[in-house]
Image (cartoon, rainbow, N blue to C red):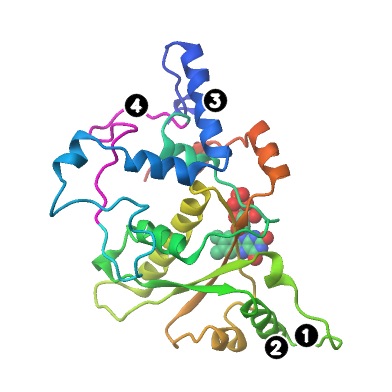
């Protein structure tokens, strides 16, 4: 690939392009992403109307409070880019590519969090992760409230940290909600363990992105103590399982949101990630 082959701008109306950029920027940075997507999803369209009765697709809003066992069918949305044919690639205008390209980890989070129904909804979505033989070798554990203090105690035990009376390990308190990601591989003659770990990591990355897209801040954290016995015990891991860290989740602080809206982080040159045999 030549150095210049990365992002090509087609010769078209620059004003229109700027309008698109502003619209997409506003969309992704105003914290309204979730409601926006729900409203759009709720709008009638010829394709979803036609599928009305037995094979009707529940809207995201309609299915939000159902149990985690709920099966959900998701049809193509009523609006947005046409993905039916290979087409031009536009990181700004395409909402999926835009979310991927602009995602950032947020280390300092405000206390609001998605509720468990929202988490289920997002986990529904990320279960599309590439998964050899569909083994679903991953799971998440919700950690809120006092459970975060228990996590701090387990980390202290693992790290052999002694604290003065009344002092606690505050690291897990950096967010109100932590989601532990567990790789949970199964014995399968066709799918080695490393592939299943890759799928679990993919689920974690997709969930980070899905949360970001839904307007939440996330930071994936782990560390050398993550799979020490005391920490594994707290998460009740099976021998075969691997703890892959925790997604720290919360609201994006307003000051950070403003910074985001004024800055863009340049993406690295794709050449460095590409080669041929
Ligand atoms: C499995 C995994 C574990 C991570 N653990 C930590 C961690 O313990 N501490 C940390 O500062 N960043 C950790 N990171 C990196 C951050 O999540 C984040 O990606 C990094 O700060 C770069 O920010 P960005 O995501 O905005 O590019 C981890 C990332 C992954 C994928």
- Vertical position of residue 105 compared to residue 20: above or below: below
- The magenta region covers 73-91
The disc, 3 or 2, on the residue closer to the chain's N-terminal end is: 3
In this view of the protein, which residue sits in the foreground, 228 or 2? Answer: 228
Q: Position of residue 210 (x, y in %)?
A: 46, 52
CA–CA distance in space, label 1 to label 2: 6 Å
In this view of the protein, which residue sits in the foreground, 100 or 273? Answer: 100
- Vertical position of residue 161 compared to residue 86: above or below: below
- Determine crowd level at label 4: few under 14, some 14-19, many 20+ residues with C-alpha closer than 10 A: few
Determine which of the numbered discs, if any, sits on residue 161 in the image.
1
Q: Position of residue 217 (x, y in %)?
A: 59, 53
SS type, badge 1: loop
Query: Where does label 3 land, which residue?
Result: 22
SS type, badge 2: helix
CA–CA distance in space, label 1 to label 3: 50 Å
SS type, badge 4: loop
Asked if disc 3 is less than 8 Å from ligand 1, the answer is no
The mark closer to the camera, 1 or 3, is: 3
CA–CA distance in space, label 3 to label 2: 50 Å
- Vertical position of residue 235 compared to residue 38: above or below: below
SS type, badge 3: helix
Query: Where does label 4 land, which residue?
Result: 88
Q: Give the residue furthest to the right.
A: 164
Q: Position of residue 4 (x, y in %)?
A: 49, 24
Determine which of the numbered discs, if any, sits on residue 157 in the image.
2
Q: Are marks 1 and 2 in contact (CB under 8 Å)?
A: yes
Q: Are marks 1 and 4 in contact (CB under 8 Å)?
A: no
- Determine crowd level at label 2: few under 14, some 14-19, many 20+ residues with C-alpha closer than 10 A: some
Q: In terms of image quadrants, where is residue 219?
A: bottom right
Q: Are marks 3 and 2 in contact (CB under 8 Å)?
A: no
Q: Is residue 234 magenta?
A: no
Q: Is residue 114 visible in the rendered structure shown here?
A: yes
């Amino acid at each position: 690939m030549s150095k210049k082959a990365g992002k090509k701008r087609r010769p078209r109306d620059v004003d229109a392009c700027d309008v698109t950029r502003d619209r997409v920027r506003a969309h992704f940075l105003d914290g309204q992403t979730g409601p926006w997507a729900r409203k759009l999803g709720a709008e009638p369209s010829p394709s979803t109307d036609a599928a009305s009765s037995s094979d009707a697709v529940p809207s995201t809003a309609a299915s939000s409070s159902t149990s985690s066992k709920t099966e959900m069918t998701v049809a193509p949305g009523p609006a947005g880019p046409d993905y039916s044919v290979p087409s031009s690639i536009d990181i700004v205008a395409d909402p999926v590519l835009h979310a991927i390209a602009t995602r950032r980890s947020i280390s300092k989070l405000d206390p609001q969090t998605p509720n468990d129904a929202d988490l289920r909804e997002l986990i529904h979505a990320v279960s599309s992760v590439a998964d050899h033989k569909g083994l679903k070798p991953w799971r998440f554990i919700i950690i809120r409230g006092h459970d975060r203090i228990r996590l701090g105690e387990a980390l202290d035990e693992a790290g052999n940290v002694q604290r003065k009376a009344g002092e606690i390990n505050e690291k897990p308190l950096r967010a109100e909600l932590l989601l532990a990601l567990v790789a949970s591989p199964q014995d399968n003659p066709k799918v080695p363990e490393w592939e299943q770990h890759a799928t679990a990591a993919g689920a974690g990355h997709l969930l980070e992105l899905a949360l970001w897209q839904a307007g939440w801040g996330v930071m994936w954290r782990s560390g050398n103590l993550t799979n020490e016995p005391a920490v594994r015990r707290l998460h009740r891991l099976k021998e075969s399982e691997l703890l892959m860290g925790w997604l720290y989740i919360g609201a994006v602080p307003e000051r950070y949101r403003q910074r985001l809206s004024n800055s863009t982080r340049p993406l690295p040159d794709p050449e460095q990630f590409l080669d041929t045999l």
